[in-house]
Amino acid sequence: MAASGADTSAASVPPPAAGEGAAPPLSGDVAKLEAELAQARKEAADHYDRYVRIMADFENARKRTIREKEELRQFAAARVLEDLIPVLDSLALAMGAAKAPNADLKSLVGGVDMVVNQAKAAMGQHGLKELNPVGQPFDPNLHESIAAQPSADVPEGSVATVVRTGYSLHGRVLRPASVILSSGPQAAANAN
């Protein structure tokens, strides 16, 4: 009986209707997939082309930046040198005046002093400042102590004499001032 019950349930299930549960025709799926694949390949080729162009643009920008940086390095001093050329002209005139048979020492010294001031003004326009700290407290960031000497006029630890002027450019020390510090007034016992 059990066998006949199994036979009756299988016999009672109707066969699937056309289009229901049956696999769709493969040719439609293949065509659709091939179209999607072709579209994906086209998009990939477009993306790769865009990538190549971007990388070329990047490389061109990198080379341009290197070239511009090199040009800046080569010509960075041009403005300073343009301002110093008149100083060279003045020095050439001073040398010509010094070599003249009737050269006047006083006017020659005055002319050289004007050239020094012209050079200082030209360099000052570009941010160069003198460090001349006479009477100021010693600052190891700005000054270089080369000696100490007693001084009744200058307090101990302050700059008594500047041996070599220092220079700074926009607040950055290019060369510290070489100075002689005051060791204070000489003791009375040492004076005797």
Image (spheres, rainbow, N blue to C red):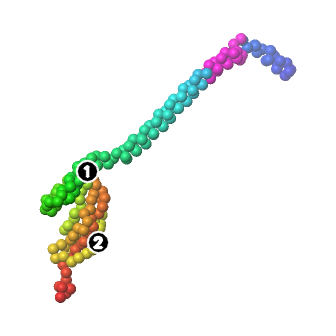
- Cα separation, mark 2 vs mark 1, equals 31 Å
Residue 153 locus on image (x, y percent): 15, 74
Q: Is residue 158 left or right of residue 51?
A: left
Q: Quadrant of residue 115?
A: bottom left
Few, some or many C-alpha atoms within 10 Å of disc 1 (few <14, some 14-19, many ≥20)? some
Callout 2: 10 Å neighbours few (<14), some, many (20+)? few
Do the residues bearing badges 2 and 1 touch, measured as CB atoms within 8 Å?
no
- Let me know if residue 27 is in the magenta part: yes
Q: Is residue 150 above or below residue 136?
A: below
Indicate left or right for 154 with 37 as reference: left
- Name the residue rendered at 49%, 34% in the picture: 56
- Toward the front, the furthest residue is 101
The extreme bottom residue here reads 192
Ranked by sequence position, the earlier of labels 2 and 1 is: 1
> Residues in magenta?
18-37
Q: Secondary structure at mark 1?
A: helix
Which residue is located at x 21 percent, y 71 percent? 160
Majority secondary structure of magenta residues: helix
Task: Residue 20: give x, y in percent of width and height.
Answer: 69, 14
Residue at (84% x, 22% y) in the render: 2
- 101 vs 52, left or right, is left
| Residue located at (72% from left, 16% from top) | 22
Q: Is residue 21 visible?
A: no
Which is nearer the eye, 29 or 95?
A: 95
Which numbered tag is attached to residue 127?
none
| 183 or 90: nearer the viewer | 90
Q: Could you say which disc has been placed on residue 84 in the image?
A: 1
Q: Which mark is residue 146?
A: 2
Residue 45 higher or lower than 190, as above or below: above
Camera-nearest residue between 28 and 140 = 140
Q: Quadrant of the C terminus?
A: bottom left
